[in-house]
Amino acid sequence: MLDQAKEHLKHYFGYSAFRPGQEEIITNVLNGRHAAGIMPTGGGKSICYQIPALILPGITLVISPLISLMKDQVDSLEQAGIKATFLNSTLSHSETSSRLADLKNGLYTILYIAPERLESPVFMEQLASMDVSLVAVDEAHCISQWGHDFRPSYLKITDLKTSLPSNPVFLALTATATPQVREDICSTLGILSEHTTVTGFERENLSFRVSRDGDRLPFLEKYIAGRSEDTGIIYTATRKVADQLYERLLKKGIRAGKYHGGMSDADRSSAQDLFLNDDVQVMIATNAFGMGINKSNVRYVIHFQMPKNMESYYQEAGRAGRDGLESECILLFSAQDVQVQRYLIDQSSFHKERQHSELVKLHQMRDFCYTEGCLQSYILIYFGDEAAEPCGKCSNCKDERTSEDVSKEAQMVLSCMIRMGQKFGKTMISQVLTGSSSKKIRDFNFHELSTYGILKHKTAKEVSEFIDFLTSEQYISITGGQFPVLIIEEKGLQVLKGLETVTRKEQNRIVQKAPDDE
Ligand code: ADP
Ligand code: ZN
């Protein structure tokens, strides 16, 4: 059967070899084993169900949240000579019935639907009368409450496990799964861990850069101007910032496009076309842009503000360089980005537990911005890859500043935290250390602590950044929901006892530089 799969790969898609993971997943599916494939964006997930679809006797049902892309996908399959169709809310009643009739008569190999369709009892009944061999769940992280994109209708997929007499194989596919989400997907769909294929998350052609507290706008303008031949995406955290940036870049004569959830469907789809056809140089967008965007020659992705978590970050950054050529992912970080994201979490309708898990993720995202270790390793470890080697090309690997021993300052911060009872957040701790005379500090009698003002030669901002650094290196951790509290970790206790030293890169003001300044 695998030979047949290889022939199909060549014949229908024109490729002569499988990519990492594809063969294993396809073998599992063809042998009737429920399976999961976790591959980075651009890794080639679609072929993992398209090829089995050609070999298995019945229909392959693909569940995907990307209604806007269904038509494109179906068109390109048809072009390759594969009979495919989709059902979604854009179709008329009669069109839907005629497609359903054709499906029952075996005229189609692949059927795409959005998960919401599973909520229709009529549709479920019709599905039960079809011979479904395979159910492929695209963007499978949407099934997990812990994922960053939970969709309640994805839970309906479990109904398919009992309602289809044809007993299909289930295949879950996603690009973004932390170990927790991965387990959630597998237990929901009954997939054994030995049938889970995780290909490396490393994208060799991407180089990562984090820039903190510089002037973002001049940096951006210069960067884009220096790459007039290249296409890029700029992500902002809010629609408002996307609008402002868009106006600003247009005024500068840059061919910019704009895409966010506040625009009409028509405006969004024309913006997307302009981008896909290389008619704009940069797309300024919120996270509404990109799920499934398959443009291969995106040379850079710039996050103008920090996104809400590492899953979103890596998915968005990963839209660069899908053609395998060297590409850059740059994050322009400023401390207030954390507040913006915090605000969005506080305003969300998530229940308490969920809000808490979002906050934890936000802190891990922030740690990425403060770490002095290899950025690529940080990403890979976050996604569960074991001991990743430093990449040698990210902004931290290339940082040539010398490291200094800051154990003394670290001890001052940590012992101040102990004296304050480990019940406060970063702002309050920085204020005590810098000797602020605020009323709150007097109320708590903190001005009488021996650590009061011991870092008064520094600004509260510098101390606060130092605390962020200690947090990103796991000397300190954050607990609590609405009012985060800092507590000392085991590693921090070792520092207090003088058993561990803390080193940090020299802190001369880092100014963001465009590449040609370097
Ligand atoms: P994903 O869904 O994982 O983001 P896609 O399925 O869209 O990725 O595949 C990304 C690109 O890689 C597509 O252009 C696809 O045709 C191509 N591709 C997939 N498998 C192979 C292969 N075995 N060899 C070469 N190219 C492949
Ligand atoms: Zn690195």
Image (cartoon, grey):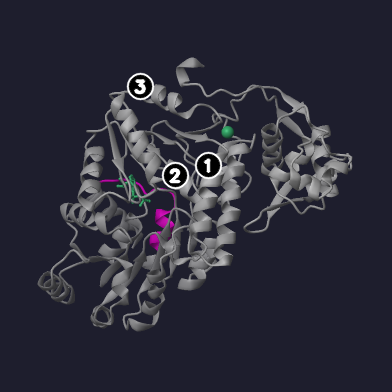
Q: Is residue 363 above or below residue 462?
A: below
**Residue 300 is drawn in which quadrant?**
top left
Disc 1 residue type?
A: Asp
Queried whether the magenta region covers residue 24, the answer comes back as: yes
Which mark lies nearer to you, 3 or 1?
1
Q: Is residue 495 above or below residue 343?
A: above
Q: Are marks 1 and 2 in contact (CB under 8 Å)?
A: yes
Mark 3 sits on what residue? 225
**Position of 499 relative to 480 (above/below):** above
Residue 171 in the magenta stretch? The answer is: no
Q: Residue at x 73, y 39 (%)?
A: 430
Residue position marked by numbered label 1 in the rendering: 337
Lower position in the chain sequence, tag 1 or tag 2? 2
Question: Disc 2 marks which amino acid?
Answer: Ala
Q: Is residue 84 left or right of residue 319?
A: left
**Between 289 and 433, the one nearer to me in the picture:** 433
Residue topped by disc 2:
237
Sequence-wise, which precedes: disc 2 or disc 3? 3
Where are the magenta residues, as a range? Answer: 14-27
In the rendered image, the quadrant that contains the N terminus is: bottom left
- Residue 202 shown left or right of residue 137 in the figure: right
- Name the amino acid type tagged 3: Ala
Question: Dot 1 lies on which element?
Answer: helix
